[in-house]
Amino acid sequence: MLGDKDLAIYRQKYYSLLVRLLWKEPEPEYVASLREGLAERAESDGELSPLIGEGWRAIDRYLDKNDPAEVADEYTQMYLGPHLPDVTPYESYYLAGSMYQAPLAAVRGFLQEIGLEQKKGEFSEPEDMLAFELEIMNWIISKQLAADSIKGEENWLDLQANFLKRHLLVWGPTCAGDIEKAKHAKFFKGVGKLLRGFLEVERQLFQDRGPEKIESIADARERFGGKGKWTGPLFEPAMPDKLTEKIEN
C-alpha cells in the first residue's frame, strides 16, 4: 500500500499544505483558495480520518465569517509574539524544555545522512521547527516518487519511517493538540485538527515499517530532560527557504 503512487501524492499534498500554513504567515490568497472544493474534501478525507474532516469544516466555518488576511495576524500572535507565543513548535522545546538541544542535533544528523542542507534565508530558525520537519517528509516523498526502482523506493520509504518514528510522531501530535487549543487559535484550530488527524494516518500507514516502537513524549522528555543543557555539536543554524540537496541521490 505504501508503494502506491496515488497514496504518495496524496500524502505529499498534505505535507505541502501543512508546510505552507505553518512555515510563516500564510498569504491571504492561499488561505482563500482553501475553500475551493472544501466540502467535498472534508467529506472524502473525513472517511480516512474523522479528525481531518473536522479540521476542514472548522476552517470552512472560520472563512465564512472572517477575512483570509486576518490569518497572518493570528499566526503572529500564536507563534511569534510580541508577548509569549501560544505555541513554541520546536522538537527541542517539546522534548528537552528549551531551544537548541539534543533533538536538534539528531535532526541535523539525519539531514546530513540523507544529503540535505539548507538555503540561507532572511530569518534564522533551527531545523527541528515543526514546519521544517514537515518539509523534510515532503522532500523524502518526492524522492520516493522519483525513484527508478523498487529498491530505491523502498529505501525512501524506510527513511520516512525512521524520521516519523524517531522525530515527528514523537512530539508532533502533542504540538498539534496545543495548536488546536491555543488561546488565539481561530483559523489554526482547524489546522491543528488537520495536523493531528494526518499524523494519526501516518502512524497507521507506517506501523509495520521502520522502528518497531514510537517513543512516547513522556519517555522522550524524561530521557532528554535529565541530561541538562546540550553541549554537543549543533552546527551553524540558518533558516531554510526550502531544503536543497548537497549531493545527488
Image (cartoon, rainbow, N blue to C red):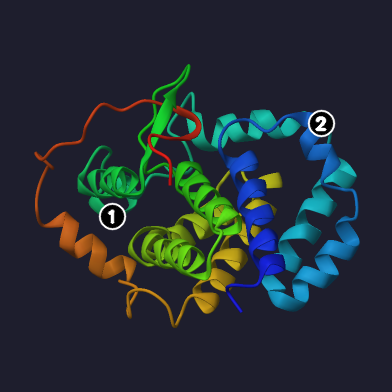
x and y percent of residue 97 in the render? Answer: 25, 48
Q: Residue placed at 52% from the left, 60% from the top? A: 177
Number of residues whose C-alpha sits closer than 10 Å to that of mark 1, classed few (under 14), some (14–19) or many (20 or more): many
Left/right placement of residue 73 relative to residue 134 reads: right
Q: Is residue 15 above or below residue 237?
A: below
Q: Is residue 125 above or below residue 111?
A: above
Left/right placement of residue 107 relative to residue 67 reads: left
**Mark 1: secondary structure:** helix
Residue 51 lies in what quarter of the image?
A: bottom right
**Mark 2: secondary structure:** helix
Front label number (1 vs 2): 2
Question: Disc 1 marks which amino acid?
Answer: Leu
Q: Nearer the viewer, residue 212 or 113?
A: 113
Q: Residue placed at 56% from the left, 32% from the top? A: 77
Is residue 108 something one can see in this rendering? yes
x and y percent of residue 40 in the render? Answer: 89, 64
Q: How many marks?
A: 2
Residue 41, label in figure? none
x and y percent of residue 14 in the render? Answer: 66, 55
Q: Residue placed at 84% from the left, 53% from the top? A: 61
Q: What residue would you read off at disc 2?
A: 29
